[in-house]
């Protein structure tokens, strides 16, 4: 009976580990995307700041629209700030998920140390 309970616990921990790993990978992808947005906003902001205030500037929205430089500057600053806050939030979530993953890994290790028969059974399944 304990064998079945340990096997069920292992399967449940394995599922949590796979789920958590998937969430971490998804979060890393989102963070890379936000880093790209942040970099584009920063570079655009740098270029806009070098222009004289009376320069005609255009915004792309499928077509080009004439916009005042100040409006584009504010928009790029907002994008930069939004990206930074989103990245910080995602980093916090990533750290939390990494802690959960480490906890699950430790639980699996403990379970396998407690039940060497289960460990042998799992190894025999993966070797085949």
Image (cartoon, grey):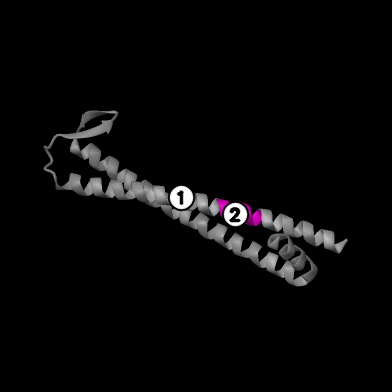
Q: Which residues are magenta?
A: 16-22
Q: Residue furthest front?
A: 128
Q: Which residue is mark 2?
A: 20
Which label sits on residue 99? none
Image point 66% across, 67% down: which residue? 106
Residue 20 counted in the magenta span: yes
Image point 33% across, 44% down: which residue? 79
Where, quadrant-wise, is the C terminus in this rendering? Answer: bottom right
Q: Is residue 71 left or right of residue 113?
A: left
Q: Is residue 64 above or below residue 122?
A: above
| Residue 14 or residue 91, whichever sits in front | 14
Q: Quadrant of residue 11?
A: bottom right
Q: Which residue is mark 1?
A: 29
The percent coordinates of residue 115 (x first, y second) are: 78, 69
Q: Is residue 70 left or right of residue 82?
A: left
How far apart marks 1 and 2 lie (CA) works out to 14 Å
Residue 126 counted in the magenta span: no
Q: Is residue 87 above or below residue 112?
A: above
Q: Secondary structure at mark 2?
A: helix
| Residue 81 seen by the camera | no
Where, quadrant-wise, is the N terminus in this rendering? Answer: bottom right
Disc 1 residue crowd, few under 14, some 14–19, many 20+, Cα 10 Å: few
The percent coordinates of residue 93 (x first, y second) are: 52, 55
């Amino acid at each position: 009976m304990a064998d079945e309970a340990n096997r069920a616990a292992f399967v449940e921990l394995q599922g949590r580990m796979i789920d958590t790993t998937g969430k971490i990978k998804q979060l890393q992808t989102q963070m890379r995307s936000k880093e790209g947005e942040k970099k584009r906003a920063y570079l655009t902001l740098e270029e806009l700041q070098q222009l004289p205030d009376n320069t005609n500037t255009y915004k792309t929205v499928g077509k080009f629209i004439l916009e005042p430089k100040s409006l584009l500057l504010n928009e790029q600053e907002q994008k930069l700030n939004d990206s930074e806050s989103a990245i910080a939030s995602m980093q916090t979530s990533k750290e939390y998920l990494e802690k959960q993953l480490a906890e699950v890994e430790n639980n699996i290790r403990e379970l396998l140390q407690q039940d060497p028969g289960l460990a042998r059974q799992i190894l025999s399944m993966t070797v085949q």
